[in-house]
Amino acid sequence: MVGVSRTRWTSGGRSGAASPPIASRTSGFTESVIREMTRVAREHGAINLAQGFPDFAAPELLKEEAARAIAEDVNQYAVTWGAERLRRAVASTRERDYGVPVDPDREVTVTCGATEAMASALLAVAEPGDEIVVLEPFYENYGPDAVLCGARPVHVPMGRGAGLDLDRIADAFSDRTRAIILNTPNNPSGRVFSRGALEVLAELCRRHDAWAVTDEIYEHILYGGEHVPMATLEGMRERTISISGASKTFGVTGWRIGWIAAPPGVTDAIRKVHDFLTVGAPAPLQEAVAEGLERLGPEYYGGLAADYRERRDVLHEGLTRAGFRCDPPAGAYYILADFSELDDRPDDAFARWLAAEVGVAPVPGSSFFRRPEDGRSLVRFAFCKTVPVLEEAARRLAAIGGARAEESG
Ligand code: PLP
């Protein structure tokens, strides 16, 4: 009965009727705290800065192309590993932006978002018992993705400040390490890993014969510095699985279009997993994203980053004025803020209080750490919202002192 829980539950209607056993695989997975915070925000009419999706419009030309594709009956399965047009667009933009040649026929797989891309990539490379290095604070899917492969996530703190604690990361590698997951620009920390740090991580991958699986979904949301794809470093093209997608670059998180660029051998394996998991990503939306990649180049990315910088600055100023301790992020669209000088409640209680009494909902920091105590004085705010919404959030945050005084008085 390996992997099967003996716990049974009774189904609502038929009293006493027991359902068959449920696999234990998911027993350690928790319900997304973000959904819970969204419910709390709705209940209290709070501004929802918990959820990481934009509240503004997607580029017109993508929407027009999606409508055109549907009207012209691009309504059946696309090629399983991705419509040819989108694979070509992914390959040529990677070549244009980073100078890495990518073969669209043998090295690109289109998936249902970066989320499916990560699960398919890990299922393609990890054996049960393998270890997968995950840096923390982490994006909440990586641990469960490793567990779904029967692998063991090995969590390592990134370290304090803007850099990475490379010695500690080196210590986490062993002869059981199959992969390290790297997310830069990073959710939730806002860090952008430097070329120097990536060089050291690359050397670790080579020494331990491990894969680098890179989540580059925020590759175009940068406030300075450069995004360095791991695959561009010496000797890393053959051991890097690069993941990105349309969700953040084009503000279309609900379209579920992501992609993977990886060497041909591992791409074959990834395509098999992807085929059995999902068959393929939505065909008309693949056309629309191809249109976006073909027609919206560096100028669009520059505008995207400039708009996000304005939003970042509004929220960062609002948070620091209100008494949070936080650095402006170097990339992505989140601020992980320390509230210990404002309040001594734990993160989940503070997040609920902030939503209910101040009217701004964040995510409790403990959701980004293996040991909840590491995130107890942190909350994460997303700033993928229009400037007036963020200005209103900043106004509400300025009233924290008053709300606390009212509570204690
Ligand atoms: N990776 C990271 C780091 C994210 O923050 C998110 C969404 O918030 C995703 C992946 C999900 O990407 P997708 O919508 O393409 O599945």
Image: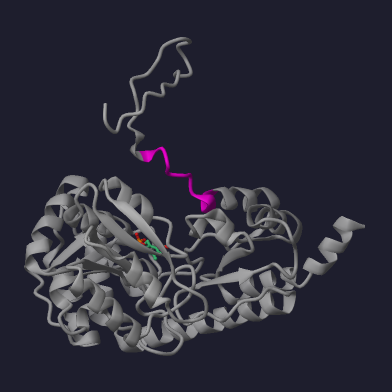
Is residue 96 something one can see in this rendering? yes
| In this rendering, position of residue 141 left or right of residue 229 | right
Above-or-below relation of 177 to 291:
above
Q: Residue at x 21, y 83 (%)?
A: 232
| In this rendering, position of residue 298 left or right of residue 335 | left
Is residue 250 something one can see in this rendering? no
Above-or-below relation of 220 to 181:
below
| In this rendering, position of residue 329 left or right of residue 63 | right
Q: Name the spot of residue 173 as percent of width and height, x first.
A: 29, 65
Q: Residue at x 10, y 71 (%)?
A: 104
Image-quadrant location for residue 318: bottom right
Query: Whereabouts is ligand 1, in terms of quadrant?
Result: bottom left
Colour treatment of the image:
one colour
Q: Residue at x 64, y 70 (%)?
A: 338
- Please tell me which residue lies in front, 213 or 108: 213
Q: Give the prevailing secondary structure in the magenta stretch.
A: loop
Image-quadrant location for residue 395: bottom right
Q: Quadrant of the N terminus?
A: top left
Q: Name the spot of residue 67 as percent of width and height, x first.
A: 29, 62
Q: Quadrant of the C terminus?
A: bottom right
Per the rendered image, the range of residues in magenta is 26-35
Q: Residue at x 18, y 74 (%)?
A: 206
- Is residue 29 rendered magenta in the image? yes
Above-or-below relation of 4 to 338:
above
